[in-house]
Amino acid sequence: MSFPQPKPEVPQLPQNLLRTIDCQQGAVRAVRFNADGNYLLSCGSDKSLKLWSVSRGTLLKTYSGHGYEVLDADGSYDNSQLCSCSSDKTVILWDVATGQVTRKLRGHAGKVNCVQFNEEATVILSGSIDGTVRCWDTRSRKFDPIQILDEAQDGVSSLKVSEHELLTGSVDGRVRRYDLRMGQLHVDFINSPITCVCFSADGQCTLTSSLDSTVRLLDKSTGEMLGEYTGHKMKGYKLDCCLSSKDTHVLSCSEDGHVYCWDLVEGSLMLKLPVGKAVVQSLSFHPSETRLLTAMEGRVQVWGAEPEETEEEVVVVQQEKA
Amino acid sequence: MFSITCVDEPLRKPVPLYEQTVKDEKGRYQRFHGAFTGGFSAGYFNTVGTKEGWTPATFVSSRQQKAGRQNARPEDFMDEEDLGDHGIAPRQITTTADFASGRKDVIRDKARAITSLSAPIPGDTVLEDLVAPARSSMGVELLRKMGWKDGQGVGPRVKRRLCKQRADSATRAFGSASPPNGSSESQDEEDGEFVPENVTFAPKDVTPIDFTPKVDLHGLGYRGLNPLAALRGGPGAGHINLFTMDSDRTNSLFGEDRKGQRRRGGVAGQGFGVGAMEDDDEDIYHRDIMSNYDTVLGGEEPGNGLYGWTAPQQYNRKKKDHSKDAAYLGKILEGFTLASDKLETKTVGIFPPPNLPRDFRPVHYFRPVVDLSSVSPMVAQALQTSRGHMAQEEPSKGGRHQLDSAQRRELLGEATLQGADCSLYSSETCRHNKMSLLNPSRFAPHAEQQQQEALSVWSGPTAQAQTGQTFKPFERTPHKQARYDLYIDQLKQGDRDALELSLDPTMTEWERGRERDEFVRAALLYKPSSSSLSCRFTRGKQDDGVEADTVEVTRDQENDVDDKQAAVKMKMFGKLTRDTFEWHPDNLLCKRFNIPDPYPGSGFVGMPKVKRDKFSVFNFLTVSESPTAIGYTTLHIHTLHYTSLHYTSLSLHYTSLHYTSLHYTIPHYTTPHYTTPHYTTLHLTTPHYTTPHPHYTTPHSHYTTPHYTTPHSHYTIPHYTTTHYTTPHYTTLHLTTLHLTTLHLTTLHIHTLHYTSLHYTTPHYTTPHYNTLHLTTPHLTTLHLTTLHYTSPSLHYTTPHYTSLHYTTPHYTTPHYTTPHYTTPHYTTLHLTTLHLTTLHYTSLHYTSLHYTTPHYTTPHYTTPH
């Protein structure tokens, strides 16, 4: 009865440079895919946030309103809203189409490192250097946060939201997971300032990168370490790490101008993607396809598994026209 | 025997007359008249012509009305009673035959069954079946007029494809046994080679649903033993299934009996003899056949089980649609239908049970409670006050000596004393006098002096400005606190004999004396801080600590960081590096996340906070129980448990504490967790905070933003300018500033003091104003430091600020200063104006490890490069 299972496809790695976008907005502090991966957001140090088409590399909109360099951004699930945070201690909620500021949220005492929508874009969560995470309500007209999570003993560097959980990484060397459903706070001690945290797609693991040049894969429920990925250099900068869309690989920025890509299970280095000479500041993986964004200096680069075909581009263009 | 027979045959009671009467439906009495004379009597003893008797109708000739006269029906000759519910011909509203549906008439069926047995051809009612009146109900007539034909379903005509699908599901629903409608027909449909376009078909007939409500207590589908089926006999009927399913039911509903089945009347089969008319006698002893039973769970294989696993394609065909799985699921219970689409199960919503810790015992574990009788009462009291829950649990405990006379009286249930008890009074006064005679210098003049001091302090302008007195030292005895408040009020008004006025005159002299002393001491200890210190202190970040007597701290504290660091080094992540706390999300946040509030009705948000007493020396240094301790000669502190030490403001006024001998016999000072992040007002200076801007090495040289400097300019906090005092056992002690205004210690004998590990993990100190250490009191007579090892080799006292360091002690015998090694050069400013220590005996001071683990002032290290 049982046929041998078909061999799974060899996972592909985003090793071909598809496009380079010169963002013209100073240094790109962060680059992010939107919810469906068709567009990208680049956070510039010239106080602007820009929306680009990934497939064509064209600028669609510039959002200006921040008073300092933009540090992080996120798009809502329905692509109708954006949120961004900045060194000017504010979080801004944008309307995508008009480019207007829907809401400017003040309250953080320091620059805001990271910002994230929740699943339904009803809450914006922002983590700041003042050691707090603030939960802003996008539904009400109140400008006060719903809740302030001040458990961190140092600045909050990274933050991710899942369906019912909140994952924060702090410079005090701890990863905190707030489980709203259970009403619990789990604190994992890493002993090195955390630069980035991620959930895995299956929701079972968390990925943390810290300033001891190590990326660690932790079991979410127990906190045990499932994998350790080293080789890159992360000593002084807040750099991103991420998992591939199918949880097969772990990717991390490095200060030596490469993006390192490890096999998740084996922990072996699969790819050392040369991006440039400077520090790879930010990266973002496509939510479903094998596509990667990297940010270095003022450029954003799009990487894919295969060299781009023109046919695909035509299709995309047609879609967008429709 | 007698008695038994008596019991067996109950006595027949004569029926009373009133129970023998019978009434008719109108309430009239009827008398039984006798069976042969016509039952109930009518009228006056059957006399005719009386009131209710039977009157014969008068003769009326009907010759003229002959034409209009109908045939008399039976009802014409019946009484009212006969037509009633219990009569011969009960009348009720029924459907007439014209409108009746095809439902079988029960009585008629019965009659038919009976006649069938006596019919010429046994077992069949041939004639009646042959000759049946062509009757149909009104609904059927209407449907026929609309074009409906027998055997069709009702509804719009459908295309072939849909039709076929329905046929499929219908055959499967019937199971594998035998499709009711000729199998050839359905087979034809399934083959379906000829599908003409534009041809519609009538929909298949649907099975009528039986809406008979279930009133019995049998299981679903139970139909009981049908006598007809049971008595029918024959080999096929050997197995009687009490539970019939839909498929069988529909058979009977349609009135279609199985074709191949032999039908026989008569009693036959198991247990019954064979009549003379019957020729087969092999059936006498019924043999059950195993094929009547299911041998496979979940019904038979498709294809009659002829082929098994290796069946040809048509039998072994996999069903893609789960709605076709009816045959696999077997029989469907009556009243249930197969779901058309699968129920979506959300995997996220299912929670595993909580992980029990390995050492979990299903027994409630109470907090270790120190037996108060085993330790000295002072320690017990200290424990009680430092741990909030204990103090609430046992408010009145703490030794009988802590109670005042009123409380004791309440406990004992005694009446209030009218006057002073003479004997008690005299004895107490005697004792007091004796004591005052014994040590007059210790009590009387000193108390006088202190009273003056208290008056001067409290009547000052600053004290007047301070409106609300926050500190309540005698909160646990409300009467005493009230008296104390009165005393303070009097002091504020500058009343000279405030003390005497405020004391309770009904108390004994001894009690009054004791209270007097306590009040004075309390007043001096907690004099308004503005007078001496508050000008030098800035308020802490959380100013609630200043107003309230307690501090809010998070209830759950993090574990030892040292252990975690070790675990991280060994890469043993997991249990060792994880802490799990209770955390309350905001209700609105839960709502926004579409999640039920895990703690509905919890009044707070975030981590649970607990109010703890501020550390106050007063908790420990109250009056000892023995009368000799009025002068406080001996104070024995055996064990000091610092569960949480919150130094809200370090203003320790030891001016009024005369400790002639302080024996700290603490064996193991094991306070491991000094994790107090809420240090409200510990004013530590940060002169040397080199804000780590040099670490900001932005990689992209063009984008060296000057903005980086600004957010951190407020960070003047980092207090760790660290004077690293390292006595041999005192590895690392980082104390930036220590404010001791007045410290009078006449003799302080500390034999062993073990600081095993002290972790100060407090990162956020907001007050940068303290670079001065003010010790402003003058009386140090003797300081005996037996072993004080300063191993640190280089201590640069770069302080020109030593304004006045008056060591006026002639006895300053310090032969034990072995090696003054001072390690750290950061001792910026140490203002020791005056330090009065009369005798300080440090026999051995073991500081094993004092870790100031605040290495994480690294916020700037990873700032966005470019």
Image (cartoon, rainbow, N blue to C red):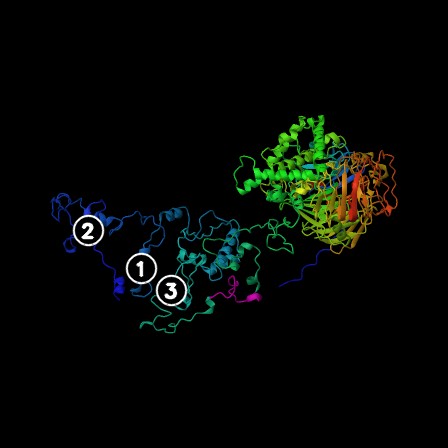
Tags 2 and 3 in contact by the CB under 8 Å rule? Answer: no
Q: Position of residue B155 (x, y in %)?
A: 46, 47
Q: Earlier in the sequence, mark 1 or mark 3?
A: 1
**Above or below, comparing residue B475 to residue B580 in the picture:** above
Which mark, residue B230?
Answer: 3
Q: How many marks?
A: 3
Quarter of the image with the N terminus of chain B in it: bottom left
Cα separation between marks 1 and 3: 18 Å
Q: Chain of mark 1?
A: B
Which mark, residue B112?
Answer: 1
Q: Position of residue B157 (x, y in %)?
A: 48, 48
The nearer-to-camera label among 1 and 2 is 2
Q: Are marks 2 and 3 on the same chain?
A: yes
- Secondary structure beneath dot 3 equals helix
Q: Is residue B564 left or right of residue A180?
A: right
Verify whether residue B840 appears in magenta: no
Cα separation between marks 1 and 2: 49 Å
Q: Residues within 10 Å of mark 1 (few under 14, many from 20)?
A: some
- Secondary structure beneath dot 1 equals helix
Q: Which quadrant of the structure image shows residue B501?
A: top right
Q: Is residue B318 left or right of residue B789?
A: left
